[in-house]
Image (spheres, grey):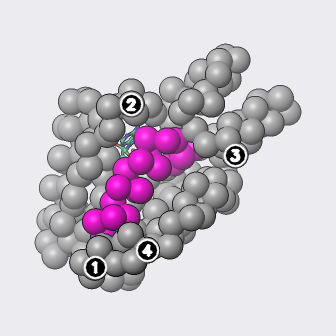
Amino acid sequence: MSENGSSDLDVTAVYPGTFDPITNGHADVAGRASRMFHRVIVAVAANPAKNPFFSVEERVEFARLTFADFANVEVHSFDCLLVDYARQHGAGAILRGLRAVSDFEFEVQLSGMNRRLAPEIETVFIAAAQDYGFVSSSLVREIASLGGDVSEFVSPAVNEALLARLRSR
Ligand code: ADP
């Protein structure tokens, strides 16, 4: 470990996702990875096909607020093939989070495809923390849109933004 708590292992990990919006579960995964990897890039997929609730600019801003105190975590958006993005940034690892068994099938398929496309990049899974294993962006959006309290699952900034967006509807 170096002084700022980051790992001395000189590997950059890319953590891709839609992050619509970033939750405490995502934050926990990236925070734990920041202690294992030299540098973690949270890569916010533009993903227009998913018709995100928040714009890519908003999703990047929320993630930047979340990781403001992490010296070795960067946040950027991307709209190209993930392995191309990872290669462009010299990443040796793709980071994904695993919650329930239901995540497993898709995540293993994705990692197999990414390995075929870029054998030199290893996918690394971090298991969700017990407290966040049931947290997803889609549930957070759904609960908030029905008037439920999601402040336990997202940062205060994201909670405010969600409430503001829902009020303006
Ligand atoms: P995507 O559209 O790529 O699935 P998400 O933002 O939904 O983007 O998720 C990004 C990654 O974070 C995925 O690997 C997902 O399994 C993981 N993830 C999502 N929520 C959590 C959580 N609460 N705890 C741990 N990992 C999570």
Residue contact between numbered discs 2 and 3, judged by CB atoms under 8 Å: no
Number of numbered labels in the structure image: 4
Question: Residue 148 vs residue 122: left or right?
Answer: right
Query: Which is nearer the N-term, disc 3 or disc 4?
Result: 4
Residue contact between numbered discs 2 and 4, judged by CB atoms under 8 Å: no
Q: Nearer the viewer, mark 2 or mark 3?
A: 2
Q: Amino acid at mark 3?
A: Ala
Q: Which mark is residue 4?
A: 4
Query: Which is nearer the N-term, disc 1 or disc 3?
Result: 1
Q: Is residue 13 above or below residue 28?
A: below
Q: CA distance from mark 2 to mark 3?
A: 20 Å
Residue 158 position in % (x across, y down): 66, 43
The residue that disc 3 covers is 157
Residue at 26% across / 43% down in the picture? Answer: 127
Q: Residues within 10 Å of mark 2 (few under 14, many from 20)?
A: few
Query: Which is nearer the N-term, disc 1 or disc 2?
Result: 1
The residue that disc 2 covers is 131
Q: Nearer the viewer, mark 4 or mark 1?
A: 4
Residue contact between numbered discs 3 and 4, judged by CB atoms under 8 Å: no
